[in-house]
Amino acid sequence: MSAGTQASSFVSSRLRGMRLSPARARRRDAFTLMEINIALLLVAIALAALLTLMPTGLRQSDLATSDTAQAAFATSVFNAMHANASTMVNWTNWMQFTDGADVLQNVTAPSFSAGAVPISAGVHEIEDHLVEHRYVKYELGLQNGVNGSEATNSLVKRAWIRSTDRRFANVAESPIYVTAFVYMGM
């Protein structure tokens, strides 16, 4: 073998050693298809979890709005009743408290379509409360004493109200709001 042949043989054997195998030649610094699929699966699972929470959040928001409307309605009725009760200085009127004639006088709830709707004891409905298409169903009760068992000549009277802004809801399942009135007359 001549020196030239020997050199070319040496170079070709060196190049063969440096040559990449076909598997290594295809490999590059990048993500594999499997890694991308796993990442997409994780993103899809996270989005699905978030989307399942969305209706729950909307429902809770709606319930919070409903609770606020119920409490505001009860507060407005009770405030008007307290204003009327504070003017009672006649014991005879105070004794008739539970029939609601004096304490509910001029107690109204605003209605968008009907103006002021009078509030009375019992179960009643108000259409378009405050704004159009806002519905209120309420039950108002008046009692003697704190627990309702005291005699009619008690100095303490109690009023309770339940309300709902759901048209077909059972008002008996709504929260109950209670207030007490104390005779301060002479």
Image (spheres, rainbow, N blue to C red):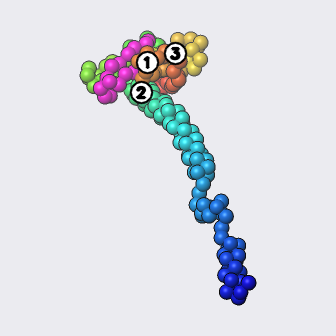
Three-letter amino acid code of the residue under disc 1 = Tyr
User: Which numbered dot is residue 35?
Assistant: none
Say whether residue 20 is left or right of residue 96.
Answer: right
Of all residues shown, which one is farthest toward the front?
A: 1
Question: Which quadrant: the N terminus?
Answer: bottom right
User: Which numbered dot is residue 73?
Assistant: 2
**Image coords of residue 165 (percent x, y):** 42, 23
Say above or below: 80 vs 95: below
Residue at numbered disc 1: 138
Q: CA distance from mark 2 to mark 1?
A: 9 Å
User: Which numbered dot is residue 172?
Assistant: 3
Q: CA distance from mark 3 to mark 1?
A: 9 Å
Three-letter amino acid code of the residue under disc 3 = Ala
Q: Nearer the viewer, residue 59 or 38?
A: 38
**Image coords of residue 98 (percent x, y):** 47, 13
The stretch in magenta equals 122-137
Quarter of the rendering containing residue 19: bottom right
Say above or below: 123 vs 25: above
Q: Residue at x 71, y 86 (%)?
A: 2
Q: CA distance from mark 3 to mark 2?
A: 16 Å
Q: Nearer the viewer, residue 36 or 110?
A: 36
Three-letter amino acid code of the residue under disc 2 = Phe
